[in-house]
Image (cartoon, grey):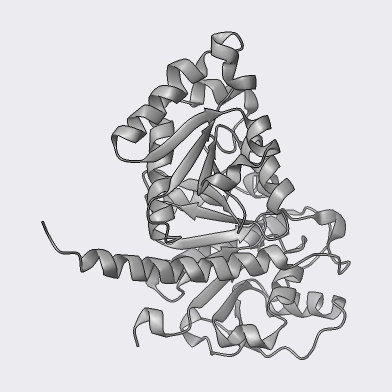
Amino acid sequence: MERNNRKPVVGITQGDGNGIGYEVIIKALSDPRSLESFTPVIYGSSKVFGFYRKLIHNLDQMDTYVIQNASEAKPKRINILNCLPDNVYVEPGQSTPEAARSAITSLERAVADIKQGDIDVLVTAPINKKAMDAEGFGNTGHTEYLQKEFNAEDVLMFMVSESLKISVVTGHVPLKDVPTLVTEDKIVNKLRLMSESLRRDFGVVAPKIAVLGLNPHCGDGGLLGDEELKTIIPAVRRANDEGILAFGPYSPDGYFGLGHYSRFDATLAMYHDQGLAPFKAIAFQDGVNFTAGLPVVRTSPDHGTAFEMAGRDLADPQSMKSAIYTAIDIFRNRIAYDRLQAGKLGK
């Protein structure tokens, strides 16, 4: 059966088992109608799944099926791939070495399966980056890990929702390092990735991308900083020369305050909080973190482990739902786009 004519198999990693990962996964999959459109495979523990299932109120019967390999996944079932020890221990709200190790195991197993083609897309629940680093993870987050695993030259942390799509030139780095890391080449590379992703992953024919400045008021002509004059404007011009519809730079306060982001298909910010703070203010409930530039589709909710509410049945599953369905949409968009490109007539 052709890949775009069958139900996609969605691999979902458990993330940190002491956070809200299991709760948002369970709630996101609680409506049996969702199983009509995709087949979920949860990488974690049926024991931990059952523990959190009992803590969530007002849930109907959930059809689960325990498997040892993704190839065993059954349609119309919530498949749980047991990849953790039987004696795994859960401490909701606590950062523990065991939870960090379990998160690493879950992620590594899912990545191995998507490489083999046993799952179609990857959705990752939140992790505790500091705890995983202490256990030898060796990466600052999912994005960096996946870039290495798939030997991607460059990737894009693309925050997407119905109302706003935004990415950043520099990701998980200290703020003091941002000015030296914002280079003309890096801006152009990110614009290339954004433009290609908007076309292939989101079906935008001629994407328009806004570029934000780095300094207050875009430097006020050099009075408050010259990165706009020396780096950002030349990068926008280079992108334009390549046929990329990039515009700017724009001052972030007025750009978001006046709603100018609605005039563009996506926005490129210079650093993490410049992009993610307005994104979460505007689209936190249904926002999705998508890693563009990979040969596979990976998404995640736009929130963290939320230890403070873990195990209390307070977690909102909407972002996890959005992450699952966004991954499926991108998966199908890529198949359709690649098929169209393969059928193009030569000159």
**What is the quadrant of residue 57 in the picture?**
bottom right
Viewer-nearest residue: 222 or 52: 222
Depicted 144 relative to depicted 285: above or below: above
Image-based side of 194 in relation to 87, left or right: left
**Compared with residue 228, is residue 71 higher up or lower down, i.e. above or below?**
below
Closer to the camera in the image, 82 or 284: 284
Q: Position of residue 323 (x, y in %)?
A: 60, 64
In which quadrant of the rendered view does residue 101 lie?
A: bottom right
Q: Residue at x 20, y 64 (%)?
A: 344
Q: At 42% from the left edge and 37% from the top edge, which residue is drawn?
A: 246
Q: Nearer the viewer, residue 7 or 261?
A: 261
Vertical placement of 193 versus 113: above or below? above
Residue 206: image location, x then y, percent: 38, 51
On-image quarter of the N terminus: bottom left
One can see residue 294 in this view: no
Task: Residue at 42% x, 57% y: name it.
Answer: 204
Which quadrant is home to the C terminus? bottom left
Q: Is residue 79 above or below residue 201?
A: below
128 or 166, nearer to the observer: 166
Q: Is residue 107 visible?
A: yes
Could you tell me how many numbered marks the image carries?
0
Which residue is depicted at the point 33% across and 29% down?
Answer: 238
In the rendered image, the residue lying farthest to the top is 223
Q: Position of residue 226 (x, y in %)?
A: 52, 13
User: Whole-percent x and y of residue 174?
Assistant: 63, 29
Is 322 left or right of 340, judged from the image as shown?
A: right
